[in-house]
Amino acid sequence: MRFSTRSLARAAIIAALYIALTLLLQPISFGPVQFRVSEALTILPILTLDAVPGLTVGCVLANLLGGAPWYDVFFGSLATLLAALLTRKFRNNFPLAASMPVLLNGLITGPVVYFAYMLIPGDPASIPALLGCMGSVALGELAVVGILGTALWYALKKLPRVFLS
Protein backbone atom coordinates (compact mmCIF):
# COMPACT_ATOMS: atom_id res chain seq x y z
CA MET A 1 0.00 0.00 0.00
CA ARG A 2 1.32 3.43 -0.84
CA PHE A 3 1.47 6.03 1.89
CA SER A 4 0.71 9.28 0.12
CA THR A 5 -0.76 12.26 1.90
CA ARG A 6 -4.02 11.64 0.06
CA SER A 7 -4.27 7.99 1.10
CA LEU A 8 -3.39 8.81 4.71
CA ALA A 9 -5.99 11.59 4.79
CA ARG A 10 -8.62 9.31 3.23
CA ALA A 11 -7.93 6.60 5.81
CA ALA A 12 -8.09 9.15 8.63
CA ILE A 13 -11.42 10.51 7.40
CA ILE A 14 -12.87 7.01 7.25
CA ALA A 15 -11.58 6.27 10.77
CA ALA A 16 -13.04 9.53 12.08
CA LEU A 17 -16.43 8.82 10.47
CA TYR A 18 -16.46 5.31 11.94
CA ILE A 19 -15.63 6.62 15.42
CA ALA A 20 -18.15 9.47 15.25
CA LEU A 21 -21.02 7.27 14.06
CA THR A 22 -20.25 4.59 16.64
CA LEU A 23 -20.03 6.98 19.57
CA LEU A 24 -22.95 9.20 18.52
CA LEU A 25 -25.13 6.10 18.37
CA GLN A 26 -23.45 4.35 21.32
CA PRO A 27 -26.64 2.86 22.83
CA ILE A 28 -27.18 0.74 19.71
CA SER A 29 -23.49 0.29 18.84
CA PHE A 30 -22.53 -1.85 21.86
CA GLY A 31 -24.14 -4.61 23.85
CA PRO A 32 -25.93 -7.87 23.16
CA VAL A 33 -28.07 -6.48 20.35
CA GLN A 34 -25.96 -4.35 18.04
CA PHE A 35 -27.02 -2.15 15.19
CA ARG A 36 -23.73 -0.38 14.54
CA VAL A 37 -24.53 2.15 11.82
CA SER A 38 -20.80 2.82 11.32
CA GLU A 39 -20.53 -0.70 9.87
CA ALA A 40 -22.14 0.66 6.68
CA LEU A 41 -18.65 2.00 5.99
CA THR A 42 -17.33 -1.57 5.73
CA ILE A 43 -18.38 -1.46 2.08
CA LEU A 44 -15.70 1.16 1.34
CA PRO A 45 -12.83 -1.30 0.69
CA ILE A 46 -14.63 -2.14 -2.56
CA LEU A 47 -13.91 1.41 -3.69
CA THR A 48 -10.57 2.21 -2.03
CA LEU A 49 -7.75 0.31 -0.37
CA ASP A 50 -7.38 3.20 2.06
CA ALA A 51 -10.56 2.04 3.78
CA VAL A 52 -8.81 -1.04 5.19
CA PRO A 53 -6.57 0.81 7.67
CA GLY A 54 -9.22 3.50 8.16
CA LEU A 55 -11.88 1.01 9.25
CA THR A 56 -9.45 -0.92 11.43
CA VAL A 57 -8.14 2.13 13.29
CA GLY A 58 -11.67 3.52 13.52
CA CYS A 59 -12.96 0.30 15.07
CA VAL A 60 -10.08 0.08 17.57
CA LEU A 61 -10.54 3.67 18.70
CA ALA A 62 -14.36 3.51 18.76
CA ASN A 63 -14.24 0.38 20.91
CA LEU A 64 -11.64 1.89 23.25
CA LEU A 65 -13.48 5.20 23.57
CA GLY A 66 -16.82 3.41 23.93
CA GLY A 67 -15.54 1.48 26.95
CA ALA A 68 -15.59 -1.98 25.41
CA PRO A 69 -13.72 -4.75 27.26
CA TRP A 70 -10.20 -5.47 25.97
CA TYR A 71 -11.26 -8.68 24.21
CA ASP A 72 -14.02 -6.80 22.38
CA VAL A 73 -11.48 -4.17 21.33
CA PHE A 74 -9.06 -6.85 20.11
CA PHE A 75 -11.38 -9.41 18.51
CA GLY A 76 -13.95 -6.91 17.23
CA SER A 77 -11.19 -4.93 15.54
CA LEU A 78 -9.67 -8.14 14.18
CA ALA A 79 -13.05 -9.03 12.67
CA THR A 80 -13.19 -5.58 11.06
CA LEU A 81 -9.66 -5.91 9.67
CA LEU A 82 -10.30 -9.37 8.21
CA ALA A 83 -13.66 -8.30 6.79
CA ALA A 84 -12.09 -5.21 5.21
CA LEU A 85 -9.30 -7.27 3.64
CA LEU A 86 -11.75 -9.83 2.24
CA THR A 87 -14.15 -7.13 1.08
CA ARG A 88 -11.26 -5.60 -0.85
CA LYS A 89 -10.22 -8.99 -2.24
CA PHE A 90 -13.73 -9.70 -3.55
CA ARG A 91 -14.43 -6.10 -4.67
CA ASN A 92 -15.40 -7.22 -8.19
CA ASN A 93 -18.26 -9.34 -6.81
CA PHE A 94 -20.44 -6.95 -4.79
CA PRO A 95 -22.68 -9.54 -3.08
CA LEU A 96 -19.69 -11.63 -1.99
CA ALA A 97 -17.70 -8.58 -0.89
CA ALA A 98 -20.65 -7.17 1.07
CA SER A 99 -21.19 -10.50 2.81
CA MET A 100 -17.71 -10.51 4.36
CA PRO A 101 -18.48 -8.06 7.22
CA VAL A 102 -21.72 -9.93 7.94
CA LEU A 103 -20.02 -13.32 8.04
CA LEU A 104 -16.94 -12.32 10.03
CA ASN A 105 -18.76 -10.17 12.55
CA GLY A 106 -21.26 -12.96 13.14
CA LEU A 107 -18.51 -15.54 13.62
CA ILE A 108 -16.02 -13.43 15.59
CA THR A 109 -17.91 -10.54 17.18
CA GLY A 110 -20.98 -12.64 18.04
CA PRO A 111 -19.11 -14.81 20.58
CA VAL A 112 -17.27 -11.75 21.91
CA VAL A 113 -20.58 -9.97 22.51
CA TYR A 114 -21.94 -13.07 24.24
CA PHE A 115 -18.98 -13.40 26.61
CA ALA A 116 -18.63 -9.65 27.18
CA TYR A 117 -22.25 -8.61 27.59
CA MET A 118 -24.53 -11.61 28.07
CA LEU A 119 -22.83 -14.36 30.06
CA ILE A 120 -23.36 -13.83 33.76
CA PRO A 121 -20.14 -14.53 35.69
CA GLY A 122 -20.27 -17.96 37.28
CA ASP A 123 -22.99 -19.29 34.96
CA PRO A 124 -22.13 -22.03 32.48
CA ALA A 125 -21.95 -21.02 28.83
CA SER A 126 -25.12 -21.68 26.85
CA ILE A 127 -24.69 -22.85 23.26
CA PRO A 128 -28.20 -21.70 22.21
CA ALA A 129 -27.56 -18.25 23.72
CA LEU A 130 -24.14 -18.09 22.03
CA LEU A 131 -25.63 -19.02 18.65
CA GLY A 132 -28.43 -16.53 19.21
CA CYS A 133 -25.89 -13.80 19.89
CA MET A 134 -23.92 -14.72 16.76
CA GLY A 135 -27.14 -14.60 14.74
CA SER A 136 -28.18 -11.30 16.27
CA VAL A 137 -24.84 -9.66 15.43
CA ALA A 138 -24.95 -11.08 11.89
CA LEU A 139 -28.54 -9.89 11.37
CA GLY A 140 -27.73 -6.39 12.61
CA GLU A 141 -24.70 -6.34 10.33
CA LEU A 142 -26.78 -7.61 7.39
CA ALA A 143 -29.32 -4.84 7.91
CA VAL A 144 -26.68 -2.10 8.14
CA VAL A 145 -24.47 -3.34 5.29
CA GLY A 146 -27.39 -4.47 3.16
CA ILE A 147 -29.35 -1.23 3.37
CA LEU A 148 -27.05 1.63 4.38
CA GLY A 149 -23.83 0.14 2.98
CA THR A 150 -25.42 -0.65 -0.38
CA ALA A 151 -26.91 2.85 -0.61
CA LEU A 152 -23.51 4.32 0.25
CA TRP A 153 -21.81 2.15 -2.39
CA TYR A 154 -24.27 3.24 -5.09
CA ALA A 155 -23.79 6.90 -4.20
CA LEU A 156 -19.99 6.78 -3.99
CA LYS A 157 -19.29 4.66 -7.04
CA LYS A 158 -20.56 7.54 -9.17
CA LEU A 159 -17.72 9.78 -7.94
CA PRO A 160 -14.78 10.36 -10.24
CA ARG A 161 -11.96 7.86 -9.72
CA VAL A 162 -9.74 10.73 -8.55
CA PHE A 163 -11.55 10.55 -5.19
CA LEU A 164 -11.54 6.79 -4.89
CA SER A 165 -8.66 4.55 -5.89
Image (cartoon, rainbow, N blue to C red):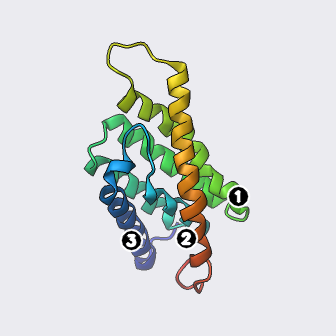
Give how far apart the Cα atoms at labels 3 and 1 are: 25 Å
Name the kind of residue labelled 2 in the image: Leu
Q: In which quarter of the image is residue 56?
A: bottom left
Residue at numbered disc 2: 152
Q: Is residue 128 left or right of residue 113?
A: right
Name the kind of residue labelled 1 in the image: Pro
Q: Is residue 152 left or right of residue 124?
A: right
Q: Mark 1 or mark 2, which has the lower sequence index?
A: 1
Q: Quadrant of residue 17?
A: bottom left
Residue situated in front as seen by the camera: 44 or 133 = 133
- Determine the residue positioned at 54% across, 64% down: 148
Give how far apart the Cα atoms at labels 3 and 2 are: 15 Å
Q: Mark 3 or mark 1, which has the lower sequence index?
A: 3
- Determine the residue positioned at 40% across, 27% down: 115
Residue at numbered disc 1: 95
Quadrant of the drawing holding the C terminus: bottom right
Mark 3 crowdedness (10 Å alpha carbons): few <14, some 14-19, many ≥20? some
**Residue 101 vertical position relative to residue 40 in the rendered view, above or below:** above
Q: Where is residue 140 in the image (x, y as percent from the top left)?
A: 52, 48
For residue 13, which numbered disc appears in the image? Answer: 3
Name the kind of residue labelled 3 in the image: Ile
Q: Position of residue 1 (x, y in %)?
A: 52, 66
Q: Mark 3 or mark 2, which has the lower sequence index?
A: 3
Give how far apart the Cα atoms at labels 1 and 2 are: 14 Å
Q: Where is residue 111 in the image (x, y as percent from the top left)?
A: 48, 31
